[in-house]
Image (tube, helix red, strand yellow):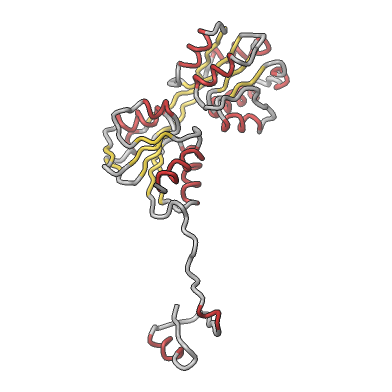
Amino acid sequence: VVRGNLGNIAETSIIEKCTAPAVIVIGETAAMDLSPTLRLPLENVTVTVTGTAGFCDKTEEKLRSLGASVNSILHLFLKEYDSVPSLDKAFGEIEKYGCIAFTGRHGAEIFLKRMKERHIDIRRLSSVKIAAIGKGTAEFLSGYGIFADIVPQVYTSAELALAIGESDLKNRRILALRAEKGSEELITLLTGKGFETDEVKLYDTCVNSDIIPESIETDYIVFGSAAGINGFTESGSVLSEKTKIVCIGSVTAGTQKKFRNIITAEPYTVDGIINSIITEESK
């Protein structure tokens, strides 16, 4: 921006080496400051996001929209099992369950895909209650016209088991869908409450340690799962003194108690992560 008056603007433009295309503003408007007046809440904040591609993409997009500088490390990937005999058995008697418990979006996605592949009519679920561990899983199911009957206020396996136990199910046979390395709490607690629980492991969460850098220098690093933070620490990567860890839940945070500066996001969602970082920056 070159400023002047009618008497010197031509000479000033030559001195400043202005070239076309250019816009000339004359009058009181020329005195206005056109620089940004609003500062985004996470400007000049650096964040490393770790996890699966889906988790990183969603988190990075929201962080960038708030001004953060983001680097994603896609060190987790999901390995879906080609054959799951226990799931095929469950499909054969799906009407006999009182409730199907989904412990995450990935399990819900695989379950519905396998139903379609096997030409299983979704109306067979009409008498079965649906339990989802959190808002994200419930929203995914709703996209298929399946609306969760049970969603805990706190998005953990323990709270899901508690919510199922308090739902007064007449049919106490439960189909629990989970990851290979998922929490055992749901099964343990449901069994302890007298439920007959069939556990089906649909996929595994794997770590690609080769892409994890030797050190992290950003202001924050985000972990969305216990598998993510465990895989990261086992790689030997070192966090700088200033780097604060943001975890999506207490279970994830609890897996690595040796770290300082751990922030547990609440609620246990991507939005919870964002809000936790904003709150930390406002201190």
> 22 and 272: which one is in front?
272
Q: Residue at x 49, y 73 (%)?
A: 33
Place residue 111 in its image quadrant: top right
Q: Residue at x 44, y 81 (%)?
A: 2
Tell me residue 273's x, y (percent): 46, 39
Quadrant location, the N terminus: bottom left
> 131 and 124: which one is in front?
131
| 251 relative position to 31: left or right | left
How many discs appear? 0
Place residue 242 in its image quadrant: top left
- In the displayed image of the protein, which residue is found farthest to the front? 283
Image height check: is 116 above or below 4? Answer: above
Image height check: is 181 above or below 49? Answer: above
Tell me residue 183's x, y (percent): 45, 20
Tell me residue 30's x, y (percent): 52, 80
Tell me residue 251's x, y (percent): 42, 25
- In the displayed image of the protein, which residue is found farthest to the bottom? 7
Image height check: is 35 above or below 247? Answer: below
